Image (tube, helix red, strand yellow):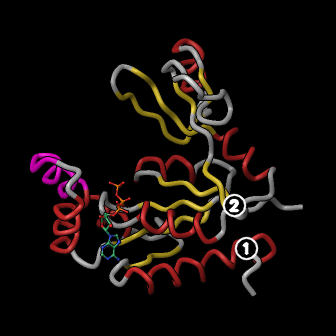
Amino acid sequence: MASIRPVVLSGPSGSGKSTLLKKLMEEYPKCFAFSVSHTTRDPRPGEKHGTHYYYVSREEMTKMISNNEFVEHAEFSNNLYGTSKMAIEKVQASGRICMLDIDMQGVKNIKKTDLNPLCIFIQPPSLEKLEQRLRDRKTDTEEAIQRRLKIANGEMEYSKTQGAYDHIVINDELEISYQKLKGLLIKVSSICFNLE
Ligand SMILES: Nc1ncnc2c1ncn2[C@@H]1O[C@H](COP(=O)(O)OP(=O)(O)OP(=O)(O)O)[C@@H](O)[C@H]1O
């Protein structure tokens, strides 16, 4: 049986990826799952290997990176984090749709794998509205907002290139965008998604 395609949501910071994913997970908790990331940081009390993260040594993770086992990886506060192909395949094997929230570079990488992802660009209605949403979110400094807006320009440009994304959802009115997203996901797996 062909495996269920993983679904990538990508788009500028503040375009609404987390908001849409949260709605989806709340409405269909059994249908979707996130992949478990790898990290070199130590587990915190109560955290379980394979549930919260896969905890690996820096040596092991560096080796995995050079073996091209990650679709994306980054370093924060002296620790490496990454989304492995294996973790995505594990979700697929469980019969659920693996949802990924990854940046433009991650999209380019995952498209080179044999995971056959459905890539959806979550587009803000305008850069002005994006800026307003980032301000209203109150999670970023002015400097961070300016940095996010600069990156957003490049992401918007890339989204227009031929074949970059399978679909674009303009996130203007949240409920309408959410329904559009659901419509696209039914096509990935009507069995799992059991909406009809
Ligand atoms: N359709 C919408 N209309 C108005 N506000 C929205 C809409 N969608 C999301 N928002 C708000 O915009 C802000 C940014 O959304 P969110 O945090 O989901 O973006 P994101 O793409 O996940 O960003 P990041 O990449 O930084 O995690 C949030 O405060 C959210 O409540």
Element class at badge 2: strand
- Which mark identifies residue 99? none
Residue on which the image places disc 2: 97
Residue at the left extreme of this rendering: 142
Dot 2 or dot 1, earlier in sequence: 2
Which corner quadrant of the image does residue 185 belong to?
bottom right
Residue in the picture at 42% in, 65% down = 19
How many dots with numbers?
2
Identify whether 190 is placed above or below 40: below
**What's the CA distance linking mark 2 and mark 1?**
9 Å
| Of the pair 35 and 44, the residue shown nearer to us | 44
| Of the pair 31 and 62, the residue shown nearer to us | 31
| Of the pair 161 and 52, the residue shown nearer to us | 52
- Classify mark 2: residues with Cα within 10 Å, few (<14), some (14-19) or many (20+): many
Magenta-highlighted stretch: main secondary structure?
helix
Residue in the picture at 45% in, 25% down = 80
Residue 145 in magenta stretch: yes
Residue on which the image places disc 1: 193
Quadrant in which the C terminus appears: bottom right
Q: Disc 2 residue type? A: Ile
The reply to whether discs 2 and 1 touch (Cβ–Cβ < 8 Å) is yes
Element class at badge 1: helix
Q: In the image, residue 121 lies at what x, y percent? A: 44, 68
Residue in the picture at 32% in, 60% down = 12
Residue 26 in magenta stretch: no
Q: In the image, residue 154 lies at what x, y percent? A: 26, 58
Quadrant in which the N terminus appears: bottom right
- Classify mark 1: residues with Cα within 10 Å, few (<14), some (14-19) or many (20+): some
Q: Disc 1 residue type? A: Phe
Q: What segment carries the magenta color?
A: 141-151
| Of the pair 151 and 183, the residue shown nearer to us | 183
> Does the Cβ of the disc 2 residue fall within 8 Å of ligand 1?
no
